[in-house]
Image (cartoon, helix red, strand yellow):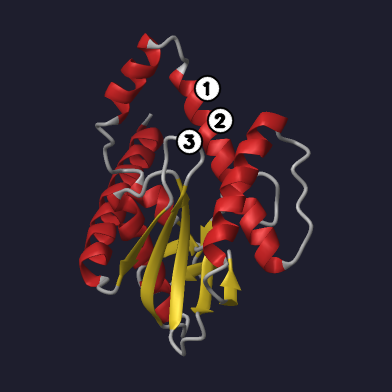
């Protein structure tokens, strides 16, 4: 991120029509694990809303530090609390440890794009030549665990990138720890059609619900 706070990007087609971003469309997927997790935190006397908001901030800062590093610009984390910055810096150091064994030649870094064909917007993390390979690799950085939605998201990004004449042939999802109970993980994917179909189903459902709600508002 080149801004300190991750802003909600708005995406528009060439005709001015606003479309949903990839992460917004995927938000339609239910997360049944959240309720038990919130209950567990509550039993420990922890406010789950504050806890998850701080984890989200740590993730935002971590992404910001990584992108600033790759863009060779100086980060400014002054708007965040020191304890969150410290945890994010630990995540950043974990990324640097991974990168010691790799060579990244960036092609696009957090670049907003719109798919005119499939009608969605996207801002992927890192498109690069990895380890001097001639093919392009899409790297998506996640802080914490890697869920199925990360694969669907990556597949949407790859289809959108193909539309813009970039052709990633592999997807690498990096799971970077924020806390001591999380591990550094990496997952590779080379088949994208199944995940893209799931994403498009989510996009269709999200759009249908959005249009329905807008129609109800107009009737009132």
Whichever of callouts 3 and 1 sits on the residue coming sooner in the sequence is 1
Disc 1 marks which residue? Answer: 50
- Estimate the x, y position of residue 16 in percent, counting from the top left: 53, 64
Q: What separation in Å lies between label 3 and label 1 (alpha carbons)?
A: 19 Å
Classify residue 148 as left or right of residue 153: left
Q: Residue furthest bottom?
A: 134
- Please name whichever residue, 200 or 82, is drawn nearer the observer in this view of the structure: 82
Dot 1 falls on a residue whose secondary structure is: helix
Q: Give the residue drawn at x 61%, y 37%.
A: 87
- Crowding around mark 1 (Cα neighbors within 10 Å: few <14, some 14 to 19, many 20+) is few
Q: How far from the left and from the top, in percent, is residue 73?
A: 77, 62
Instruction: Please state the horizontal and vertical placement of residue 92, each as a whole percent of the image.
Output: 60, 51
Q: What label does residue 180 carry, if any?
A: 3
Q: Which residue is mark 2?
A: 54
Label 3 vs label 2, nearer the camera: 3
Q: Secondary structure at mark 2?
A: helix
**Position above or below: 149 against 58:** below
Q: Is residue 123 above or below residue 138?
A: above
């Amino acid at each position: 991120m080149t801004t300190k706070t991750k802003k909600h990007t708005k995406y528009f087609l060439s005709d001015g029509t606003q479309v949903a971003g990839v992460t917004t469309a995927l938000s339609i997927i239910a997360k049944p694990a959240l309720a038990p997790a919130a209950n567990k935190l509550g039993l420990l006397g922890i406010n789950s809303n504050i806890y998850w908001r701080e984890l989200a901030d740590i993730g935002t800062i971590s992404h910001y530090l990584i992108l600033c590093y790759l863009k060779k610009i100086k980060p400014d984390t002054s708007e965040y609390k020191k304890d969150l910055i410290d945890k994010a810096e630990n995540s950043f150091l974990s990324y640097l440890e991974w990168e010691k064994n790799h060579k990244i030649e960036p092609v696009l870094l957090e670049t907003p794009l719109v798919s005119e064909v499939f009608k969605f917007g996207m801002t992927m993390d890192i498109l690069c030549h990895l380890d001097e390979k001639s093919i392009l690799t899409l790297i998506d950085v996640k802080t914490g665990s890697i869920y199925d939605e990360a694969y669907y998201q990556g597949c949407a990004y790859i289809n959108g990138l193909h539309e813009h004449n970039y052709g990633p042939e592999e997807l690498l999802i990096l799971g970077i720890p924020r806390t001591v109970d999380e591990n550094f993980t990496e997952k590779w994917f080379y088949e994208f059609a199944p995940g893209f179909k799931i994403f498009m189903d989510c996009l269709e459902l999200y759009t249908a619900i959005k249009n329905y709600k807008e129609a109800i508002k107009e009737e009132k």
